[in-house]
Image (cartoon, coloured by chain):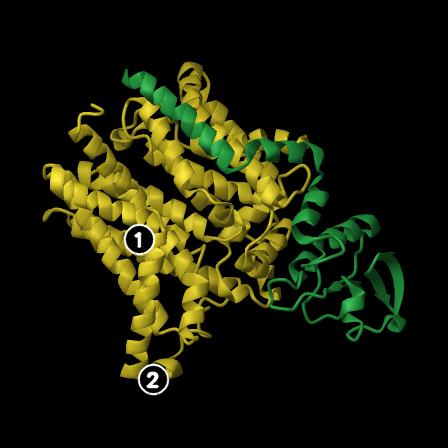
Amino acid sequence: MLKKKLTILIIISLIILLIKVNFFLNISQILTVKYDERISNVYGFCEREGIGYVKFLKKKFEINGKIDLINSLEQNNNNSGKWAIYNSNYHESEKSDYLIIINYKKIINKVNLDNFKIIHNHQDCYLLLKND
Amino acid sequence: MIEILQIPLFFIIFILTLFVPINLFQNRPFLKNLSIIEKSSLNFALNLNFLLFISFLNCSVKSIQPILLVIYLIFFFGNYYGNSTLLKKFLILLIPLFIVFFILSINISIELFLGWDAKFFYYIKSLFFFENKSIFDLNNFSQNFWHPHFGSYLWGFFWSISLTETEYFGRLFYLFLFCYSFFLVSQIGKNQKINISIFLILIIIFYEYKFFSGLQEILIFSLLVLISKFFYEFINKQDYIYTILIILFSNLFIWIKSEGIIYFLLPLLIVLFLGKNSLKPKMYIPISLLLLYIVKIIVYDISNLNINSQTTFYNLNYLKSLDVEIVIRKIGHITVWLIYYIITNIFYPLFLLFIIIDKLYIKKNDKNYKYFKLIYIYLFYIIIFIYSAYIFRDMEIVQSIRTTMDRLIMTASGFLVYPCIKITLSYFRYKKVIK
């Protein structure tokens, strides 16, 4: 009798766990949505922190230089997106060659595009290379 | 699809740390009191300390991984060649661990977001290790001094094994440690169905993605879950092999978080529970801890890291400026928030409830009595630590509490998981629901 009850308890617990973590929805997503797209869903592509766009650029251009990033979010250290462009090969005090801008129109006063060469543009987001 | 297929592969890599260097099925005199699963945790403790040692070397994770893999495989086949029946039996025992690990790994692979501290400190440090840097390069990261490196090392180490070089695979080791700790403490009797039920219930109660968002608290929590069980076994069996397990796991605390030093000192509690004639452990436990801390000082000195990381928040000038009024105001805030966070953490109310049940229904059991005495001392110790940490912290008190106390309470609750299981089972046995 106890054995039967325990088996039922195990099955119910397993079902609760599967529901709690949205297992079936998650597994369908992992099968159909690529990692980079999932990153974009979490952090935004050309919006919010813009990490999706950063990942896309890093892959497409295989950028070797140091990159800086500006997004339009109200800065609080946690949403600057700097963690995604950190490069351990460069010292922090070194100046960046590249600049990624997320939602340029909202921060138009902060960056003058004339000082840069536009390498890539998607909607309101840019990958820029500093003019010599 | 490749991500899903990698999860079982990572599980195999992780459980390899449970099988070597000690043969789980060989009966050695000094391991006679350890069950097979406890022997696996001795292996786990040894391997984690071995990885810690490797993290001190000036070599990249990618250069060391193939060597480690070969060594581990040689050990594995050397140990278990001709033990296939026992091995199969033990692997069957681990199936629930794998199922839960797989389910939760899928959740982590979808949620993906990193916590505040993770983005700011731990991810970047793990990136150093992922990009083939060593502990000697960490000084190039300006925020390095805040926290030790071992959690990030594990993250970077396993991240770089991933075929797709996907970051979250490094964090799956945190999940494995968490699942394993719950799995070990749920191995409470011979009836595997009861054990599995306890394991699943614990996971349902406690699992939240945010704990695996790269924050280090879950590592300390999981280690406390393990240590708490070994304290119980030590009090029960008075076998010193458990003190070795406790010391090995405790050593990791000081390499994971700054406040790890508080938990690192926990083995000293063993001394309180030793008999009058136990002079030897009374000596070797404090000496071992002292030596382990000296190792940290030496490693930090050699690698030019700053061991005194918290001078921004804890400094002499601020201590001098503290007066009675400020202290009383701080104590008021701390007390209110402490009660709030204790109530919202599942294990504290459960523990209190179970203690009441224990007092009302269950007959005094000397073994449990001594263990609960230890838990009370632990709780007292943690509360003193929390009050001191916030009173002496040079930061606006409410902001300080609201940004850190929930995690502090969560971390410390790891020590209560095992006593909660013990009291629940005692109650069910008393009610004759189970034998």
Could you give the CA–CA distance between mark 1 and mark 2, rounded to whole angstroms? 34 Å
Q: Amino acid at mark 2?
A: Lys
The residue that appears at 33% across and 73% down in the rendered structure is B391
Q: Which residue in the protein does label 2 denote? A: B320
Query: In the image, which disc is placed on residue B426?
Result: none
Q: Residues within 10 Å of mark 2 (few under 14, many from 20)?
A: few
Name which of mark 1 and mark 2 comes first in the sequence. 1
Does dot 2 land on a helix, a strand or a loop? helix
Question: Which of B204 and B386 lies nearest the eye of the viewer?
Answer: B204
Subunit under mark 1: B
Q: Is residue B189 left or right of residue A16?
A: left
What x and y, as percent, mark residue B250?
35, 50
Does dot 1 land on a helix, a strand or a loop? helix
The residue that appears at 41% across and 71% down in the rendered structure is B398
Rendered green, the chain in question is A
Rendered yellow, the chain in question is B
The residue that appears at 44% across and 49% down in the rendered structure is B218
Among the 4 quarters of the image, the one containing residue B233: top left
Q: Is residue B254 left or right of residue B137?
A: left
The residue that appears at 23% across and 32% down in the rendered structure is B425
Quadrant (top left/top right/bottom left/bottom right) for the C terminus of chain A: bottom right
Among the 4 quarters of the image, the one containing residue B38: top left
What x and y, as percent, mark residue B380?
23, 59
Q: Amino acid at mark 1?
A: Ser
Q: Is residue B427 left or right of residue B409?
A: left
Q: Is residue B64 left or right of residue B273?
A: right
Q: Which residue in the protein does label 1 denote? A: B288
